[in-house]
Image: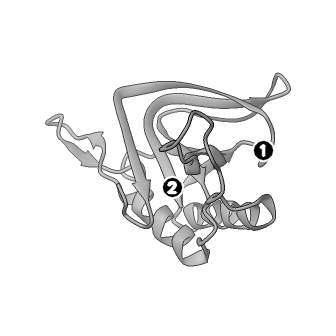
Amino acid sequence: MRAVVQRVSRASVEVDGREVGAIGPGLAVLLGVGQDDGPEQAAWLAAKIAGLRIFPDAQDKLNLSVSDIGGAILVVSQFTLWGECSRGKRPSFSRAAGGEKAQPLYEAFVAELKKLGLTVATGVFGAMMELHLTNAGPVTLLLDTDKTF
């Protein structure tokens, strides 16, 4: 699994002009599921993101997690995180999982976050979505369960 994690002061996602998910302070997570991913990757990545210490403490040091600040997480599916752009100008998405595999793992990732006690909002899997966010910091991290970056 791959994720782009952004610390936000607020974020929302719309489908067909209708807001389907919104959060205040917390994290916006774009999640891509790869062909080789399974439930273990969903659980590992959820725990990793929930525990990331990327919020400032009283001394302005990045020592607090989203749980510590009482924040929420907005999760949006993003198969294009698996886009391979090393050759030519058209990305290949051959390493991305198809919807029949990706959707249950996306849902498992969301369920793992909720099991950790987090408030989670989501987009609509497979839909054309518009994501609106205010990146706080800005703080943006790339995570990969294969630890390639």
Q: Examine the image and state in which quarter residue 135 appears.
A: top left
Location of residue 4 with respect to 110 vertically, above or below? above
Question: What mark, if any, has residue 124 been given in the picture?
Answer: 1
Location of residue 47 with respect to 29 vertically, above or below? below
Q: Residue furthest right?
A: 16
Q: Name the amino acid, label 1.
A: Val
What's the residue at 79%, 34% (across, down)?
A: 128
Tell me if residue 91 can be seen. yes
- Quarter of the N terminus within the rendering: bottom right
In the displayed structure image, the side of residue 34 where residue 56 appears, left or right: left
Nearer mark to the viewer, of 2 and 1: 2
Confirm or deny contact between disc 2 and disc 1 (CB under 8 A).
Answer: no
Give percent across and percent down for residue 149: 35, 54
Residue count near mark 1 (Cα–Cα under 10 Å), binned few <14, some 14–19, many ≥20: some
Residue closest to the eye, 133 or 103: 103
Q: Name the amino acid, label 2.
A: Arg
Tell me if residue 78 can be seen. no
Question: What mark, if any, has residue 2 been given in the picture?
Answer: 2
Residue closest to the eye, 127 or 97: 97
Secondary structure of the residue carrying tag 1 is loop
What's the residue at 77%, 49% (across, down)?
A: 125
Give percent across and percent down for residue 145: 45, 65
Location of residue 24 with respect to 91 vertically, above or below? above
What's the residue at 66%, 57% (across, down)?
A: 94
